[in-house]
Image (tube, grey):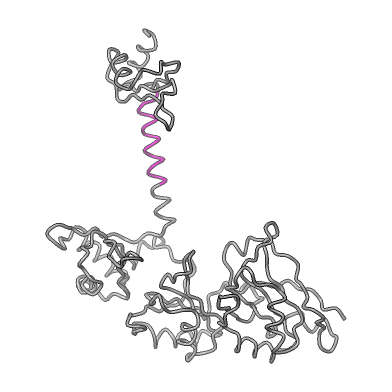
Amino acid sequence: EKPQKKKKHPSSMSETEKNATTQPEAAAPEATPEGGNADAKTEFSGTSLYTGDLDPSVSEAQLYELFNQFGHVVSIRVCRDLITRRSLGYAYVNFANTADARQAMEMLNYAPLNGKPMRIMYSQRDPSQRKSGVGNIFIKNLDKSIDNKELHDTFAQFGNITSAKIMSDGSGVSKGFGFVQFDSEEAATKAIEKVHGKLLRDKVVYVAPFVRRSDRSADKDGKFCNIYVKNIPEETSEEDLKKLFEEVGETTSVAIMKDAETGKSKGFGFINYEDPDAAAKAVEKFDGHAISEEKNLFVCRAQKKAEREAELRAKFDQERKERAEKFAGANLYLKNLSDTVDDAQLRELFNEFGTIISCKIMRDPAGASRGSGFVAFSSPEEATRAVTEM
């Protein structure tokens, strides 16, 4: 009997993966369900494996050949973009029984395939469980040499791990933080108690319960724990910064941003406090602090990229609005100008009609005049006079 097709729900996927359309599930070669009962497979509770971090070149045939050695594979699906047909980097492997699936996960998790270690976990079909955050912990200030497998091995002693993931940039370099998902809240709590504040590869790590992005905003109660520090002298170390800023309270992490190639300080960094009151005190006390003869620190609440962009956009829009209101009716557009006319000649030509704020001849990339330009007066009345008399 031909196995029944089923939609799977990724237990861990990016926004790109969520939004992309995937191709229909491809059945493994000559695979049939044991016992011939299609309904027995509808849940795949312990038989469906999510296989992530795949190289784009990995195919269903490769996965079948690899996983079939551990038992009867019912079906395999590599998820692909419907338009480009490019792999989204994850797949589902469905076994006929739980024992085979478990053995495959134990033996192949983090094993390399086409040069990239696979990340394998049970497929979590219940979306409420995936989104609840129960049993999920966040770890930061990790040494960049730590990979998914080492993260998994470090926390495996505290309970059954369903997923361990180091976040990386586009080139595959660790961002210094990651997530571990346990199958129980008790295991997650134990891991936080035992590892938070401890040394891992000579770096003090911060471990806490995972908080969804929508719940992290400091604007909800006006409190924050993470601060941004710039104008840090090149010779100042993270230990020096930690000693200075712990005058107001205990820090959970201190990081100075460094150039990836030279290892030199970029002159800014981030400090995280356990207590939001300590973070507020740090901003108040150290903003403007003379850390050296040449430099005063700039300290403020660390903003997320989206917050910074929104703030800059609002500032730019306001400035543009004010500029438009200020020069409404006072800005003149000129065309059919001789190619020999420059900014100075344009100013001299209109100077008699009032105070000129700015004047500009428009030019192409090669510097040649486009035969048009602008003259901005200090008032609409002056601009009107120029139009009337010219």
Instruction: Please determine whether, in this image, residue 208 is positioned above or below residue 233.
Output: below
Residue at horizontal 77 percent and vertical 78 percent from the top: 28
| Residue reaching furthest to the right | 1
* Location of residue 36 in the rendering, given as x and y in whole percent from the top left corner: 85, 86
Query: Quick check: is 148 in the magenta stretch?
Result: no
- Give the residues in magenta: 313-328
Residue pushed farthest top? 389
Q: Residue at x 45, y 15 (%)?
A: 336
Find residue 91 and report its horizontal and vertical position in percent: 66, 73
Q: Is residue 347 left or right of residue 339?
A: left
Could you say where residue 24 lies in the image, as x and y percent from the top left?
A: 76, 67
Quadrant of res 243: bottom left
Question: Where is residue 271, by image quadrant?
Answer: bottom left
For the C terminus, the image quarter is top left
Query: Is residue 354 placed above or below 240 in the rendered structure?
Result: above
Q: Nearer the viewer, residue 211 or 201?
A: 201
Q: Residue at x 49, y 87 (%)?
A: 187
For this orientation, the residue located farthest to the left is 293
